Amino acid sequence: MELKKLTPVLIVEAIEPCLPFWEGRLGFKRTMEAPHGSALGFVALQRDAVEVMIQTRASVMDDLPQAEGRGNSAALYIEVKSLADVEKALQGLPILVRRRAPYGAEELFLREPGGHVVGFAQHA
């Protein structure tokens, strides 16, 4: 078995409020999107080698009703070259924690508009 890639899918109530964070603040670009009713139901976003997908809870329930009540949260850990650049992009947003990890990384964590914790780390 060969594994090629892992992409997290964040389940949210609405995608539109999340886009200013991912596209505006962090510079991700949409690579795919699909409507669900009158709103977005799914979006794939990419920057460099990092990809994240965002899907609405309603869209998930239509696609996979067996998943109800499961898989509703996630946290992301993104390694970056410069934490200072990330802090500049996130200026004005509430940071949950900034710390030096015992394994030699400078990290900061915040909650993105969909409610998921996103961590950024610059490893020594």
Image (cartoon, rainbow, N blue to C red):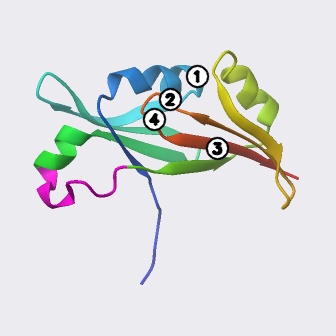
Q: Position of residue 122 (x, y in %)?
A: 79, 46
Asked whether disc 4 touches disc 1, contact meaning CB atoms under 8 Å apart, the reply is: no
| Residue stretch rendered in magenta on the structure | 63-72
The residues bearing labels 3 and 2 have C-alpha atoms spaced at a distance of 13 Å
Residue at which label 3 appears: 119
Q: Nearer the viewer, mark 3 or mark 1?
A: 3
Residue at which label 2 appears: 22
Asked whether disc 2 touches disc 1, contact meaning CB atoms under 8 Å apart, the reply is: yes
Asked whether disc 3 touches disc 1, contact meaning CB atoms under 8 Å apart, the reply is: no
The residue located at (21%, 47%) in the rendering is 60
Q: How many marks?
A: 4
SS under mark 4: loop
SS under mark 3: strand
SS under mark 1: helix
The residue located at (47%, 30%) in the rendering is 29
The residues bearing labels 4 and 2 have C-alpha atoms spaced at a distance of 13 Å
**Residue 79 on the magenta segment:** no
Residue at which label 1 appears: 25
Residue at which label 4 appears: 115
Q: Is residue 90 above or below residue 43?
A: above
The three-letter code of the residue at mark 4 reads Gly
